[in-house]
Amino acid sequence: MLGSALQRCKSPTWSPRSSAWHWLWLIGCCAVTPTLARAQAIKLAELEARAVRARPSIGGADARIAEARARVAAAQSAYAPTLNLLAEASFSPGQRLVPFPYDATNPNSDPTTRDYKVAVITPFGAGNALTPVPRYGVSVDLRGNIYDFGRTSAAVDAAMAQHRAAEADAHRTTREIVRDVRAAYVRWATSYALHSLCERALHSAEERKQRAAASIEEGALRSADITAAESDLGFAKLELHRASADLDDAREDVGFMAGIPLGPEAQPADELLQLGAPPPTAANAKSVDPALQTLQEQRSAAKASARVHDHAFTPVLSASAQAGVQGQSGSVFPLYRLVVNMSVPLWDGGGDRAIRSQAEAQAAQLAAQAEEYRAQREHMARRSAASRQNVQQRIATADELVRLCRLRISQLEEGRPLGAATAPDVAAARATLQRAETELVLAQAAQAQLALGLE
């Protein structure tokens, strides 16, 4: 893009007045080109942040946290009373209101009332025994528990334990997503480095073929001597095709893990393969393992759920207050009621005991899983310590081998004009160098995996 702009400026048909926009276009290219180059380099931290935002499993974990939070609020609502507005209208026979005259001789009679209304039940056989009577009423009902001997507090504790377990599981999900992105990124960086080695090998093979062809034209080599150079070029092309396929697969995996498509021009930006030694095992042991924390919190939630059913047969002391009006036919009467009630469960058919046993069994299962996971983690820590030492030795050995191979090639190239080295010798030395460089890349990739906690 930039070269074409400069070429236009050098053209004999170019004039500043007629093509002034070319300068603006050239300035824009100079400003945009570095941005595009930087946009092709993808950083690991950017992919991790994108994956955490884009992966659907994060939304599912957030939904589980919201569900657990709502469960806590539902359990805590048992502490608050309930208020209801009751309205009733019915038609039914019996208990008809009939007037009762005022008795002046009765000292308990109300002198301000000339008659009373009393409910009379009409027996069968009477003419109005089946006559429906309208009844109606409106009242406000307030109910709540005074004391339930720890039943509500146990339910709240269980809900809060489930909320902590949901948060731990969300943290574990996030860590697993980050781990998947890191593993894919290391593979991508490794494939990119190996692809670069294959490209250099191909260019070197092409140069050797060109030199061989030139030497044949000069008469220094026979025409049959170019066959070795062509074979080396063919093998280099095959290696590059295989490396290109691996690179495309690795880039596709990174894009899938991060939830963002990556084009062929994308390349890893971080020098992961040049990372230093990973932190010691003691430092890693102090960090909280989200998977182990999730198992522990789920076990605590199961035990808390079992404790809820310990209060299945405890008494419940409750109270209710009701106030309103009640009417029958054309008469309306005031209504209020205050009730204190104690309920003692005696038998439920064994349902609570079965649920409690189920929760205890689940807690025991989670405890066993946590113990097994802890043992596996200790085993992996010991393996990581051994792998850390081994990979450092591999890097040092491969690095020294690369240096020696390059020195060997230099010596052969210097001795070749004198007849001290042949083309097959140089080709074999270059193949050894590529193998050594490949081993160095693989060792550096193993070190990067240890440094990122991917052991």
Image: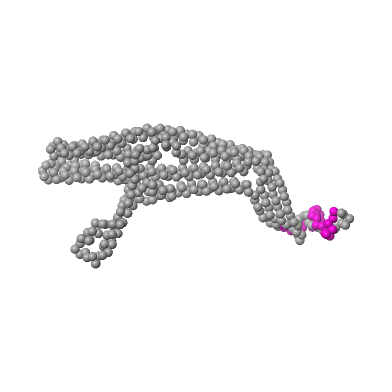
Q: Main secondary structure of the magenta part?
A: loop
* Image quadrant in which the C terminus is located: top left
Asked whether 283 or 266 is in front, the reply is: 283
| Residue 70 visible in image | yes
Residue 201 locus on image (x, y percent): 24, 43
Task: Please identify the residue farthest to the bottom as the structure is shown.
Answer: 17
Task: Please identify the residue farthest to the left as the structure is shown.
Answer: 219
Horizontal relation, residue 399 to residue 229: left or right: right
Residue 293 locus on image (x, y percent): 49, 39
Q: Residue 306 is drawn in which quadrant? A: top right
Kindly identify the residue that appears in the image at 28 percent across and 59 percent down. 27
Horizontal relation, residue 233 to residue 381: left or right: left
| Residue 249 visible in image | no
Q: Residue 308 is drawn in which quadrant? A: top right
Asked whether 85 or 397 is in front, the reply is: 397
Q: Which residues are magenta?
A: 108-137
The answer to whether residue 113 is magenta is: yes
* Image quadrant in which the N terminus is located: bottom left
Kindly identify the residue that appears in the image at 11 percent across and 45 percent down. 218
Residue 68 locus on image (x, y percent): 54, 46
Kindly identify the residue that appears in the image at 23 percent across and 58 percent down. 6
